[in-house]
Image (cartoon, grey):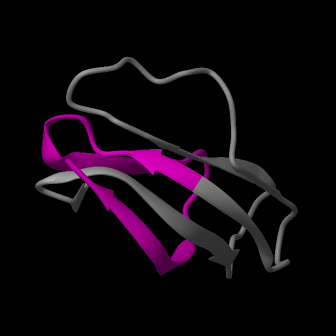
Amino acid sequence: MVPISGVTAALTNLTVTLANAAGYLTAYPCLTDAWPGTSNVNFGAFETAANAALVSGSRGYGCLAPSAPTDLVVDLFGVWSS
């Protein structure tokens, strides 16, 4: 979980690297919503992949859920505060 207290949404760039298997990464407001069944980044084994994502800050947390073990890099570009 990534704490984003007092933030309505955050614009991020999500990068997946060093994954041992193909998979996907999902960013979503995990404390209030169920996993949405969609992905923000799709990646192959041993490749680096990135994508921009607008993450909602419901209840002050946004979750990143990879389907396979991987390293993640999150760049924060901007936030909208409540």
| x then y, percent, for residue 79 | 37, 65
Q: Position of residue 54 (x, y in %)?
A: 55, 51
Residue nearest the observer in this picture, 74 or 24 = 74
Q: Residue at x 68, y 82 (%)?
A: 18
Q: Looking at the image, is 71 positioned above or below residue 44?
A: below
**Which quadrant of the rendered structure holds the N terminus?**
bottom left
Q: List x then y, in percent, for residue 40.
A: 69, 48
Q: Is residue 38 left or right of residue 5?
A: right
Whether 69 is drawn above or below 71: the answer is above
Side (left or right) of 9 relative to 57:
right
Compared with residue 77, is residue 2 higher up or lower down, i.e. above or below?
Answer: above
Q: Main SS of the magenta segment?
A: strand
Pick whichever, 28 or 21, lies toward us: 28
Does the segment drawn in magenta span residue 77? yes
Instruction: Name the residue located 19 percent from the left edge and 47 percent from the top edge.
Output: 82
Q: Is residue 61 left or right of residue 27?
A: left
Residue 13 lies in quadrant: bottom right
- Displayed quadrant of residue 4: bottom left
Q: Is residue 74 above or below residue 7?
A: below
Which of the 4 image quadrants contains residue 47? bottom right
**Residue 78 at what x, y percent from top left?**
45, 73
What residue lies at 12% left-to-right and 54% top-to-bottom? Answer: 6
* Range covered by the magenta-colored residues: 54-82
Instruction: Count numbered badges in the picture.
Output: 0
